[in-house]
Image (spheres, rainbow, N blue to C red):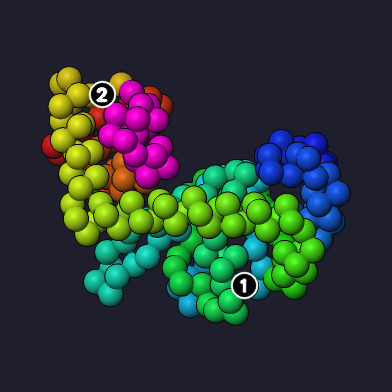
Amino acid sequence: MDTDQFQHLFPAFRTAPQAAREIMTAGSVVSFPADKLLYRDGDVCEGIGLLLAGEIRVYKVSASGREITLYDIFPGESCILNASSILSHRRYPAQALSTVAGRMLYLPQSAFRRLMDRSDVLRAFIFGLFSQRLAEVIELVEAVAFGRLDQRLADYLLEKSENGRLETTHQKIANDLGSSREVISRLLKDLQRRGEIALARNRIRLLTF
C-alpha cells in the first residue's frame, strides 16, 4: 500500500501526507480470516489496527451468553475501545470478531502512543471516531433500555414489506426513522443473527415477523 491508497481509505490524512507516511512506516500490514476472534474481553492491547479491508464486529457477551453489538468497524476506521485501552493502560472491555476476511495496518502500542503525541491529524482522526462511536452507543443504549428504535424498526419492516419482502437500503431506513445508517445496520444484523430476517443487497426478507 502506498501513501495515495492510504489517504484514499483515510480521508483525514489527505492533507497530511507526512503524517500518513509516518503511520505507514511505523506499522505493518496484517491479514486475518473471517470469523477470527481478534480480541477477548480482558485482553491486553499490544497494538491497534487501522482497517484496510474486511469488517470487524465489536460486541459484549452477558453472563448468560447473550450478545449485543456495540459497533462494526469498516475499512477506513479503527477501534475506539482498542485506542482507549492503549491510552488508558486498561484491558480490552469487549470482544472483537472479524465477520469478513481482511487486512489492517497494525501499529504497536508504543508507536501508537508516540504518534498520538506528535500528530495532530492522528489525534483528530481518533477523537473523531470517539465522538461518532459514543453517539452510536448512546443511541443503542436508548434502543435497548427504552425499547424505542428496535421496536420502531420492527414496526417499520412490517409496515413497509409486501409478502414478507422489502427492497430498500439501510440508509433509506435510517433516514425514515431519523437514525444513522450504522445503527440501523447493526440492529438489522442482530435480527439476522437471531434468524428473524434475511439480508441481501438492498433487500430484506422477513422470516418470523
Q: Residue at x 19, y 55 (%)?
A: 146
Q: Main secondary structure of the magenta part?
A: helix
Residue 86 tag number: 1
Image label count: 2
Callout 2 amino acid: Leu
Say what amino acid the circle numbered 1 marks.
Ile
Residue 203 in sight from this viewpoint:
yes
| Residue 203 image offset from top left, x and y in percent | 33, 25
Spatial distance from mark 1 to mark 2, Cα to Cα? 43 Å
Residue 93, relative to residue 10: is it above or below? below
Q: Give the crowd class for mark 2: few <14, some 14-19, many >=20 residues within 10 Å.
A: some
For this rendering, which residue is in front, 166 or 180?
180
Which of pointers 1 and 2 lies earlier in the amino acid sequence?
1
Circle nearer the viewer, 1 or 2: 1
Residue 32 appears anywhere in the view: no
Q: Which label was assigned to residue 166?
A: 2
Q: Secondary structure at mark 1?
A: helix
Residue 151 sits above or below residue 163 on the image? below
